[in-house]
Image: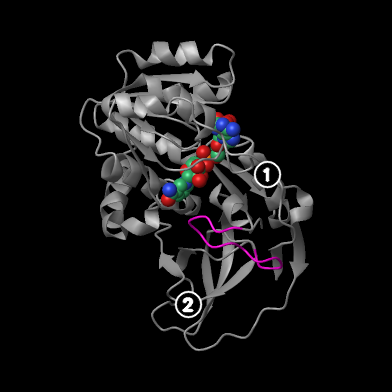
Amino acid sequence: NRVVTFARRPEGLPDATCFALESRPLPALAEGQVLVENHYLSLDPYIRMRMEAKDSYAPVMALGETMVGRTVGQVIESRDAAIPEGSWVVGRLGWQDYSVGTKADVQFIHPDRAPLSAYLGSLGSTGITAWIGLVHIAGVKEGESVLVSAASGAVGSVVGQLARARGCRVVGIAGGARKCGVVRERFGFDDCVDYKAPDFTERLAQAAGPGFDIYFDNVGGPIFDATLPLMRLFGRIPLCGLVSQYNAAEPYGVRNLREVFNKRLTIRGFVISDHRDVWDMATQELERAYAEGRLVYEETVIDGLENAPDAFIGMLQGGNIGKQLVRIKTA
Ligand code: NDP
């Protein structure tokens, strides 16, 4: 079994020496365990946080441990009667060809309804993240004005579509003209502003019109700061992630905090595992939208488990459009 393990704690952006590709024998299954052949691996920004020496909202990874990550795969051996061989599952099964788990580690998926990989993206925890932040945390209302950062990414692209479905005007922020084009044309946002362009602040102010009711923040840092003056009175900011800060040596100091006070803004961090009570509601809306062709998604897929470290490092720098995945089972 090929396994990617955690070899070195990064300072700043991880590099190849932070990972090791090992070959390990597969253990015999104990009662209640299943063996899953992994087909796709999801590469997510939170994994970078788990490489830190200090706890974030998730516990730290120990050196030598299998890299954490969600996969979809097929059960090829089972010692749990409730999970028959041949079942398709998703779970946090790690960067490896085969994983051993129990029913606590996996959920069933439906490959007859959507491609396998969608269960790591829009129809999985990515879509649920978008729904929880926008609907449950920010309480989006019909016709509001919504701003989303990392708009061409996995979570951001779903946020925009859920908001548009509620009659909202949606503006995205993304890195580069090409990504902004995808955000507008493929994901149907009303506008998208390139944060790498020299006139970013002016363009964002133009796109804001009378201001934003909601800013769905995926990135933190200077972009978060730039949005505060553009929020409307009593605006809400669901803080989903801070991807611009995960590799930063020094935390960014926010300058426009006064705007939070002036505008009586609500900023609320959230982590989806605290909101399991609404997962079914989120999944129902996402599955319905997908089945009706109203939820489009993009994937950036690279082949081969051995290429997972490069793809992960690339994703942290914006190499992806939509969900970053690794196809583990290539033949
Ligand atoms: P994405 O698919 O959005 O990929 C990350 C993107 O971040 C890149 O494509 C890049 O896009 C952008 N980015 C990287 N560096 C910067 C920077 N310095 N400034 C601005 N943008 C940057 O990842 P996900 O959709 O998986 O995750 C999005 C966010 O959601 C992350 O912050 C993640 O931690 C968070 N998250 C939170 C969860 C929760 O429970 N709260 C659950 C899941 C995810 P670009 O080219 O535009 O820069």
Taking the spot 71% from the left edge, 68% from the top edge, the residue there is 64
Secondary structure of the magenta portion, mostly?
loop
Pointer 2 residue: 102
Whether 57 is among the magenta residues is yes
Taking the spot 59% from the left edge, 21% from the top edge, the residue there is 196
Whether 137 is among the magenta residues is no
Q: Position of residue 122 (x, y in %)?
A: 42, 45
- Res. 216 in view: yes
Q: Is residue 30 above or below residue 170?
A: below
**Of pointers 2 and 1, the one earlier in the residue sequence:** 2
Q: Position of residue 236 (x, y in %)?
A: 30, 33
Taking the spot 36% from the left edge, 24% from the top edge, the residue there is 259
Q: Tell me: 13 left or right of 217.
A: right
- Res. 296 in view: no
Q: Amino acid at mark 2?
A: Thr
Pointer 1 residue: 313
Question: Magenta segment, which residues?
Answer: 54-66
